[in-house]
Amino acid sequence: MKEQDLADGQEIVKLLEEGRADRRDLLALLMYMREELPNDQVKDIAHFVAHADRDRGYAFTYTKGFVDHLVSVFQGGGTLTVKEIYNTDVLIGQFCRDARKLGIVVSREKLTTHSNALKALLSSLLDGVSFKIANPRVTSCRFTLRATAADGGKSLLLEVFSDGSIQGTIRWPRNVGITFAVFDEPSA
């Protein structure tokens, strides 16, 4: 990282630790860090900032496997296990490790305290990203930010649509989206 980018990155991390960062702050930080990151979940999210259509990476691999399994269960029955794509504790741990390797001082405890604010910022950045799933029965697979609670709270969801040809144990009509949480449950 360039010296000025490192200084800017440190200021942005301070804002994240205080729960005062905004979407543009996190966007800038991920852009500064992107080329320096190891292949982990943080780099995967940083790539979403640059590429709104994904056909590789951690979330793509998870999502493709999940969608293929979902279609299989709908057609032939079985057990469907739904697990979040990103676990907040893992993500914060990887972010702290990555930032420290770049020379950015970061407090995992402070980030964890403001983890819901961090997830809201990440959700804003990931909203609208689509996956190029090569399953002929799936017409659309994307992240979408939706109101999910009576209090107006929003959650990032993985939304999957079929072509209407999935008929087996469960019939999945065309234009009916099925959604699943992207992040684990909010911290208390």
Image (spheres, grey):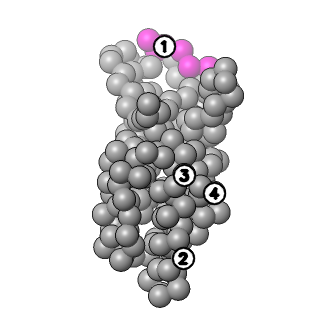
Q: Which amino acid does label 4 sit on?
A: Asp
Q: Which one is in front, 63 or 148? A: 148
Q: Mark 1 points at which residue?
A: 170
**CB of mark 1 within 8 Å of CB of mark 4?**
no
In the structure shown, which secondary structural element does the residue marked by tag 4 occupy?
A: loop
Residue name at image x 37 percent, y 15 percent: 77
Check the image and report above or below for 76 versus 47. above
Q: Which is more N-terminal, label 2 or label 3?
A: 2
Q: Mark 4 points at which residue?
A: 22
In the structure shown, which secondary structural element does the residue marked by tag 1 occupy?
A: loop
Of tags 1 and 3, which is closer to the observer? 3
Q: Which amino acid does label 3 sit on?
A: Gly
Check the image and report above or below for 56 versus 176. below
Magenta-drawn stretch contains 170: yes
Q: Where is residue 64 in the image (x, y as percent from the top left)?
A: 42, 42
How far is disc 1 from disc 3 in space, using C-alphas?
Answer: 43 Å
Q: Which one is in front, 87 or 157? A: 87
**CB of mark 1 within 8 Å of CB of mark 3?**
no
In the structure shown, which secondary structural element does the residue marked by tag 3 occupy?
A: loop
Residue 165 visible in the current orientation: no
Q: Which is more N-terminal, label 3 or label 1?
A: 3
Q: What residue type is labelled 2?
A: Asp
For label 1, count other residues whose C-alpha is less than 10 Å away and answer few (under 14), some (14-19) or many (20+): few
Q: Position of residue 140 (x, y in %)?
A: 60, 39
Q: Position of residue 65 (x, y in %)?
A: 37, 40
Q: Name the residue under label 2.
A: 8
Q: Main secondary structure of the magenta part?
A: loop
How far is disc 3 from disc 2 in space, using C-alphas?
Answer: 17 Å
Read off the magenta span.
168-174
Residue name at image x 67 percent, y 20 percent: 150
Of tags 1 and 4, which is closer to the observer? 4
Q: Which one is in front, 54 or 74? A: 54
